[in-house]
Image (tube, rainbow, N blue to C red):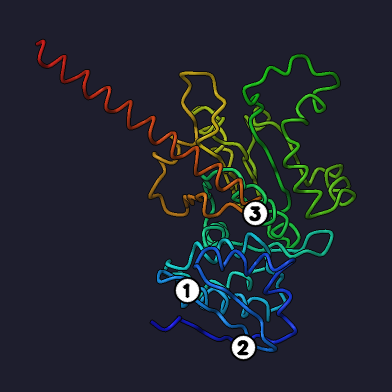
Amino acid sequence: MDIPKRQLEIPNTVIVNIFGKLDENVKKIENAFEVSIVNRDDFVQIVGLSQSAKVDKALAVLQKMVVIAKKGEKIDDQQVNYLIASLEDEHFEHIEKLNDDTICMTISGKPVKPKTVGQKKYIDQIRKNTIVFSIGPAGTGKTYLAMAMAITAFRAGQVNRIILTRPAIEAGEKLGFLPGDLQQKVDPYLRPLYDALHDIMGAETFQRNFERGVIEVAPLAYMRGRTLDNSFIVLDEAQNTTPEQMKMFLTRLGFNSKAVITGDITQIDLPEGKRSGINEAVRILDGIEDIAICRLTSRDVVRHPLVQKIINAYEKTEARAAYKERERESRRLRRRGRLL
């Protein structure tokens, strides 16, 4: 039987970007599709190493990498993993267009762009709708992309203020007495928002706008009784709101304002027995015009590749536990029926 082979022309100007440091990019493709990839002058040869080798799939991934590299984009570990994982998806044909959507530039000159199709849909929903709920696991860019959109709207003069808030709930820890004034007490809860602002806007520009009052970072409790006009509002960690707090927040929205609510429903830190406000809000508001609900998954994780594996492992364990609990409840009901 002939060994399957394919050949792809890759310009020398992008070959280093394609192969990656110590050839780590092509090694991922080789392992995923059971092929060998060898560079010969301006051509790359892909050779199947087994009967189950997927030479054409490896070729398709490499072709997308060439298109992305020719645009001047640096190909990293996350991007290669995502291309491999997305190969069977209907959006794979146009996946390179993700790199065409630059939201803004960070203070260091790095472009902020959606890195997955899920993130692209999230950004598009923010552009089209007044209220957007973004639900997904850690590392999917929920908060960071919302912050980038808020800063972009502010710079463009679309809003006059950026208001960032989150509930001050301890993540399963008792922090005890915190020294300092009220702002210093709540700052630790708001640190992720500060980090994103500093990264995109720069510490000095943020501080200047913060002192002018056009950027506000505050705990959710500070929102009560206010009407927020001409503002871009981001509610982070919304899984830790109660239904009453969520209703209070949503009814603060004023004219010419936009709100993005982010949350990870697998990391709820509310006291046992308390319902999460984001779960109830999504159920009640689903289908209302100008309100969008974006659900990101582990496929949209853009942190270290291990984060995606950790999330998947937890999801499988939780799904098994839920299945066993349903089975126990079913057996209990059957026994009860026999006794009656």
* Residue 29, picture quadrant: bottom right
Q: Nearer the viewer, residue 221 or 91?
A: 91
Q: How far across and how far down the image is residue 262, in percent?
A: 57, 43
Instruction: For mark 3, give the secondary structure.
Output: helix
The structure residue drawn at horizontal position 59% and vertical position 50%, both measured from the top left corner, is 140
Q: Nearer the viewer, residue 72 or 219?
A: 72
Is residue 230 at all visible to an observer of this figure? no
Q: State if disc 2 and disc 1 touch (CB < 8 Å).
A: no
Which callout, 3 or 1, points at the residue further toward the start of the chain?
1
Q: Nearer the viewer, residue 54 or 232?
A: 54
Label 3 and label 1: CA atoms lie apart by 31 Å
Q: How far across and how far down the image is residue 124, in percent?
A: 54, 62
Q: How far across and how far down the image is residue 16, in percent?
A: 74, 76
Count of marks overlaid on the render? 3
The kind of residue on which mark 3 rests is Leu
Between circles 3 and 1, the one closer to the viewer is: 1
Q: Is residue 86 above or below residue 306?
A: below
Asked whether, in this view, residue 116 is left or right of residue 55, the answer is right
Q: Which residue is mark 2?
A: 9
Structural crowding at the residue carrying mark 1, measured as other residues with C-alpha within 10 Å and reported as few (<14), some (14–19) or many (≥20): some
The kind of residue on which mark 1 rests is Lys
Q: Which residue is mark 1?
A: 57
Which callout, 1 or 2, points at the residue further toward the start of the chain?
2
Q: Please give the label number shown on residue 145.
A: 3
Q: Nearer the viewer, residue 28 or 159?
A: 28
Q: Is residue 265 above or below residue 21?
A: above
The structure residue drawn at horizontal position 66% and vertical position 63%, both measured from the top left corner, is 113
Q: Dividing the image into 4 quarters, which one contains the N terminus? A: bottom left
Instruction: For mark 2, give the secondary structure.
Output: strand
The kind of residue on which mark 2 rests is Glu
Structural crowding at the residue carrying mark 2, measured as other residues with C-alpha within 10 Å and reported as few (<14), some (14–19) or many (≥20): some
Which callout, 3 or 2, points at the residue further toward the start of the chain?
2
